[in-house]
Amino acid sequence: MSTKKLAAFSFAILAALPASAQEKVLNLYSARHYQTDEALYTNFTKQTGIKINRIEAGENELLERLRNEGVHSPADVFLTVDAARLGKADELGLFAPVTSAYLMQRIPAQLRTDTWFSFSKRARVIVVNKASVNPADVQSYEALADPKLKGKVCVRSGAHPYNLSLGAALLAHHGAQKTEAWASGLVANFARAPKGGDTDQIKAVAAGECGVTIANSYYVARMLRSEKPDDKKVMEAVTIVWPNQKTTGAHINISGAGMLKTAPNKDSAVKFLEYLASDQAQVYFADGNNEWPVVAGVKTSNPGLQAMGDFKADTVKVGALAAKQADVQKIYDRAGWN
């Protein structure tokens, strides 16, 4: 029996057990696939005695599963990356409001909605080839559409949630007309058709295939921390620019979670969400997966993040990023950013 089928079979058994047999349990659907998150789950169980039953899969697969399971779903919490994906779950009516003074106090207002919460942050940074592009020419996302960069920009697909969320932030700041002009200018500057992930873009910049790209900060931090000679060589060839430091600040996206409306273990779900906002869990997010804490004042010791330095962050609400995804996709489609 495959791992996924076995997990589904196990959850089916769980759903059939009497309530007394399900005490101290949390059923988690997670689209985060980071090995370092194991420490999060292990520590939660040690602290609370609540056992975590976990299914990991792609966010689309999990959302489809939740829709198919309906009111009979055994899942208590949905955990994933990117505001767009959490927004999609919200659109489907999957989340329930959570009443928690602790979460309200710990999570900044712009990083939560009425039904889901951010627990870690990552930024969209500009990565520049030192030999072919002057960093002074790319101090903002808007500058990437400047004709002087024609043939120098490489990016991943415009359909990817990371880029859709960036576009949603620009849309919030500039409106539809200027955002579409920016997207068209960006496409005109492509060195090649979009392909690959963020790490592929960084490597393409280092190799001179293009001169500049946009990448999520945790990929950059991961490579800065790497001991592999090839990764070290890549990072020696590039420099990092924190965008829009004199204006709106660098675009921020998140990892987050919400309690499901049909959760059979609501008390466990709230405890888990509150645990993710604890200092200890926030450090796990930062030091384990190169993400910044969302809780102010949490001290971390991640050399990759430290090497990237301090920056001004955009304060657009994550709920607004999620709400504008469809509009941004239409803009990108018209601009030819596929």
Image (spheres, rainbow, N blue to C red):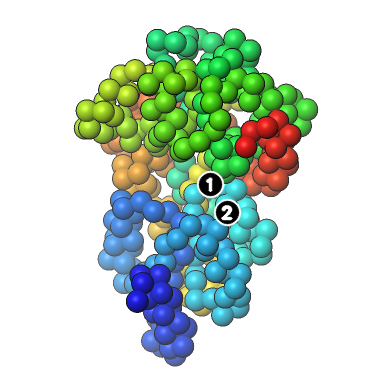
Viewer can see residue 48: yes
The foreground one among 200 and 43 is 200
Specify the amino acid type for callout 2.
Leu
Q: Which image quarter: residue 295? A: top left
Residue 192 in picture, x, y percent from top left: 53, 26
Q: Residue furthest front?
A: 192
Reading the image, the residue beneath label 2 is 86
Q: Quadrant of the N terminus?
A: bottom left
Residue 181 in picture, x, y percent from top left: 72, 24
Q: Which image quarter: residue 200? A: top left
Reading the image, the residue beneath label 1 is 82
Residue 317 in picture, x, y percent from top left: 62, 41
Residue 251 in picture, x, y percent from top left: 55, 32
Circle 2 SS class: helix
Specify the amino acid type for callout 1.
Asp
The foreground one among 334 and 297 is 334
Q: Residue furthest right?
A: 177
Q: Quadrant of the C terminus?
A: top right
The foreground one among 63 and 245 is 63
Q: Residue at x 36, y 39 (%)?
A: 290
Above or below 36: residue 140: above
Left or right: residue 120 versus residue 229 is right
Q: Which image quarter: residue 233? A: top left
Marks 1,2: beta carbons within 8 A: yes
Circle 1 SS class: loop
Above or below 240: residue 227: below
The foreground one among 233 and 283 is 233
Q: Residue at x 52, y 62 (%)?
A: 61
Above or below 186: residue 197: below
Label 2 packing within 10 angstroms: few (<14), some (14-19), many (20+): many
Q: Residue at x 45, y 30 (%)?
A: 201
Mark number displayed over residue 255 = none
